Amino acid sequence: MSPLPYPEPALTDVAVGLIASQQVLRGAGYLEEGRLRSFLTSGGTTSDALVFSVVSPGEAD
C-alpha cells in the first residue's frame, strides 16, 4: 500500500451536548467539520454528533 499524496486527518465525533469535550478537542487543535444528524444511539433514542478533525503538524507541510 503506497502512502497517500496528502496528509490523512485524525477524525473524532462528540455528542452535541458535550460542550466540555468540544472545548478539549478545540484546545487540542481539532477543527469542527460538521454535524451528523441522528448519528448516536443510546437507550433507544438518537442524537446528533459533531465531527472534528486535525492534521498532525508534521504532515501539514
Image (spheres, rainbow, N blue to C red):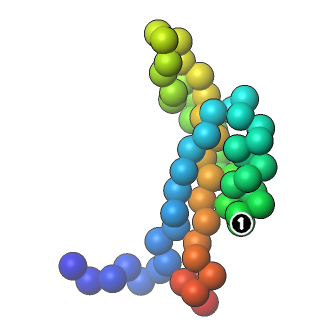
The answer to whether residue 15 shows anywhere in this view is yes
Q: Position of residue 55 (x, y in %)?
A: 58, 72
**Depth check: 15 or 60 in front?**
15
Q: What residue is rendered at 63% in x and 33% in y?
A: 15
Quadrant (top left/top right/bottom left/bottom right) for the C terminus: bottom right
Q: x, y percentage for residue 52?
A: 62, 53
Q: Amino acid at mark 1?
A: Gly
Q: Does residue 4 lie above or below 17 as drawn?
A: below
Disc 1 crowd, CA 10 A, few/some/many (<14, 14-19, 20+): some
Residue drawn at x 59%, y 22% is 47
From the viewer's perspective, is 27 left or right of 35? right
In the rendered view, tell whether residue 4 sits above or below residue 35. Answer: below
13 lies above or below 2:
above
Which element carries disc 1, helix, strand or loop? loop
Which residue appears at 71% of the width and 34% of the height?
18
Q: Residue furthest top?
A: 44
- Residue shown at 61%/66% (left/top)? 54
Across the whole image, how many numbered discs are drawn on residues? 1
47 relative to 61, above or below:
above
Residue labelled with disc 1:
29
